[in-house]
Image (cartoon, helix red, strand yellow):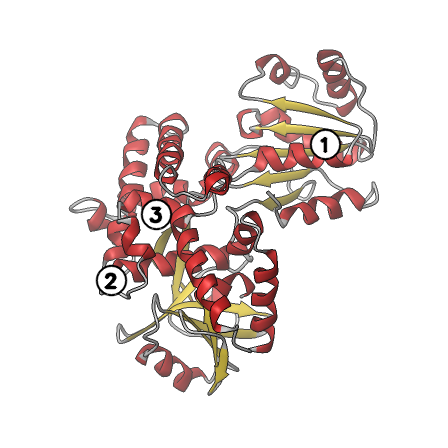
Amino acid sequence: MKRKFASTLLQWKAKKNQERMPLVLGGARQVGKTYILNQFGKENYKNIVYVNFEANLVAASYFEQDISPKRVLQLLEVHFETEIIPGETLVIFDEIQLCERALTSLKYFCEDANQYHVVAAGSLLGVAINREKYSFPVGKVEIQNLFPLDFEEFLWAVEKKQLADEIINSYLNNSPLPEVLHLLALDLYKSYLIVGGMPAVILEYVQNFKISNVPNIQSNILNAYVADMAKYASNSESVKIRAAYNSIPAQLAKENKKFQYKVVQKGGTASLFGVAIDWLTFSGVVLKCHKIEHAYMPPSAYCDLSSFKLYMGDVGLLITKSAIAQQAILSPIESGNTFLGAIAENYVAQALHTNGHTLYYWESDHLAEVDFVIQKEEKIIPVEVKAGSNIRSRSLSVYCSKYSPEYAIRISSKNFGLENKIKSVPLYAVFNC
């Protein structure tokens, strides 16, 4: 499957030695980090030296003492019986969060051996760094994150690249798609909600275009997440992490989607579950969206750290975790199921996060709320999300009246358009935002 991140890897490879630092790739488990790095190596290097610190304990032991690049590379060459050639060999350190000394060694690869091409990946790297106080090589590595496939990549996977290109063109020109393409794109969007963006799930789906096996694969991924909670946290903390994670569908089902500790556990508080939520955020399993009360620049300065929403990192996993019927998603008839709105909101949060936006929502005196607020250069743009074609929104009107943004974005099942400074964006086109 084609990934947009492949271009980032090519740009990294093309840098001059003195400009290229070891690349550290983070992201939630099973988003495809190992696959994309190995594929990148196969397509662009003479050979690969792949070290998995979870599976290869012997190779991990090479980092227990002297971690100078010269010694490490010498031992790896002997271990793998292959020559490591500058610029021709890609060295991959996988699950690097399990080997603190290997993580530290990247500093010396940057300073003393930048002619070698070294990449690292870690599923729970954020958790390890923030919890174990690792000696992270700040300023000596290039940090990137890989996310689930977005809807455009999903279209590529199902061989609808031309449709993706038409969507991009309509977004840029605010021109409606032909109705037949608009309806096709909406149908594919609904399929994406169920399938989500996890590579293993999409791979299964494109083999026969049936969604019957999708929940089984997604359940395996969810179980792997739970296993990580037990493996990489103490017993008492893992219980809290699971409880907070399991509460997300119920949190999103509320009319007020602000995360409430009492939904996790009666009498729950920030002091009780704050560390658990940090774990989920650092692991990439959930997305955190903070409240701002004033839409001024920069939004981070007006952020209320105590008020936030939590979304699942992948909308397909939310569908399986919530156990909502697939028919409710696929039905062409707009139903009154309010959870469909929560699913659409989660999907948009995922798309905005993938595009590099810090997630904020705006609320004013508990009277008006805009689902998302994004920063584009020096502009703050309000984003309203509707699961269907009903686009009435008093909150968006209140926001626009108060702050007079250059334009606002309304996401719904309606076609493209621009009217009264409100840009209409169909749900399937959010990957452009």
Looking at the image, which is closer to me, 377 or 431?
A: 431
- Give the structural element (helix, strand or loop) at label 3: helix
What residue is shown at x 55% (from left), y 28% (from top)? 95
Q: Position of residue 11 (x, y in %)?
A: 75, 48
What residue is shown at x 48% (from left), y 69% (from top)? 180
The N terminus - image quarter? top right
Q: Earlier in the sequence, mark 2 or mark 1?
A: 1
Looking at the image, which is closer to me, 402 or 350?
A: 350
What residue is shown at x 49% (from left), y 75% (from top)? 416
Q: Position of residue 164 (x, y in %)?
A: 57, 60
Residue wearing tag 2:
338
Q: Position of residue 18 (x, y in %)?
A: 83, 42
Q: CA distance from mark 2 to mark 1?
A: 47 Å
Vertical order, 405 against 23 (above or below): below
Q: Is residue 127 left or right of residue 11?
A: left
What residue is shown at x 40% (from left), y 70% (from top)? 412
Q: Disc 2 residue type?
A: Thr
Q: Disc 1 residue type?
A: Lys
Viewer can see residue 259: no
Residue wearing tag 1:
42
Q: Position of residue 51 (x, y in %)?
A: 64, 22
- Give the structural element (helix, strand or loop) at label 1: helix
Q: CA distance from mark 2 to mark 3?
A: 15 Å
Q: Earlier in the sequence, mark 2 or mark 3?
A: 3
Residue wearing tag 3:
318
Q: CA distance from mark 3 to mark 1?
A: 34 Å
Q: How many marks?
A: 3
Looking at the image, which is closer to me, 295 or 351?
A: 351
Q: Is residue 429 left or right of residue 82?
A: left
- Give the structural element (helix, strand or loop) at label 2: loop
Q: Disc 3 residue type?
A: Leu
Viewer can see residue 177: yes
